[in-house]
Image: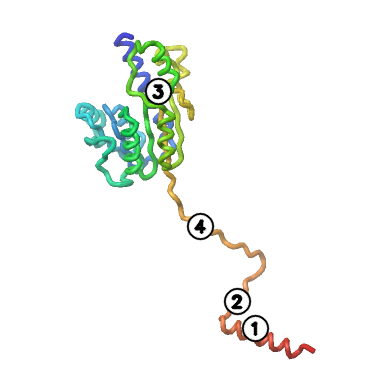
Amino acid sequence: MDDRQSDITGQYALHMQKQLVQHCLAPWPRRGRTLLEVNCGRGELLPLLWEYGFDMTATEHDPELRAEASRMADRAEVLAAVDDHLPFDDDEFDWVVLHIASPSTESTRKAIAESLRVASAGLALTFWNSASLPFMLHLLGGRKTAWPGPTFCWWQIWRTLRSLSAGRISGASVLAGPQGTWNASCALSGCNRVLPWLPMGAWGIIRIDMAKSRPVTPLPLRLGRRRMRRAEPVLECGHKSQAKAADTERKAP
């Protein structure tokens, strides 16, 4: 694949990634809500997330990528931080988007747990999916073309979230076709659209919504047409009851 074709493929993949982000984050309230993007890279999604209405903060460990991200989104604060040790308080953000970067299973688990710590309402994980059809074809083809980034198994990420028992889990993916179809001019590019719940795409998002318990409003008691008796003092009620019982005994034969 030459440089021009590689650039076209990369731009198309980014376009589909943005579509998936929009699809997966659509249920989240935005106006006046804070969102943290962890491992933001060059900040390619920062302008999009800000345009969606979130109050944005981002972190990136690599200094060069962090500088590019700062230039990409002048209305978002980009801080230096590693994903498994974020410099924020518990529940400081409404939402967190974590781009998984470490190939280590234990490091990934720590990064997920740390993102859950600072998120009060929800977390979205993005990653290149090693369980996808395109990646399997990439391996069978002898890795002749470069893969966009490190890969992670969809089901392993899913099981990790299940083990943390943090909320309701859902997911979706894009780019289910071979890399040769990652081009808008390709007749088969339609197979790369958003696939809700299906882990077949090369790039996926797994979202977890942490539902908070809400106070329950007691239901009113339906009395029908009967009226409630007027309240009486306890001693007086007892006195009347005793008097009525005594009167009944006197009248008995």
| Tag 4–tag 1 contact (CB < 8 Å) | no
Badge 2 is on which residue? 230
Closer mark to the observer between disc 2 and disc 4: 4
- Taking the spot 59% from the left edge, 84% from the top edge, the residue there is 236
Residue 78, image x, y percentages? 24, 35
Q: CA distance from mark 2 to mark 4?
A: 26 Å
| Tag 3–tag 4 contact (CB < 8 Å) | no
Badge 4 is on which residue? 217
Q: Disc 2 or 4, which lies upstream in sequence?
A: 4
Classify mark 4: helix, strand or loop: loop
Q: Is residue 190 above or below residue 21?
A: above
Badge 3 is on which residue? 130
Report the amino acid beneath label 4.
Answer: Thr
Residue 40, image x, y percentages? 29, 31
- Taking the spot 63% from the left edge, 65% from the top edge, the residue there is 223
Residue 151, image x, y percentages? 36, 24
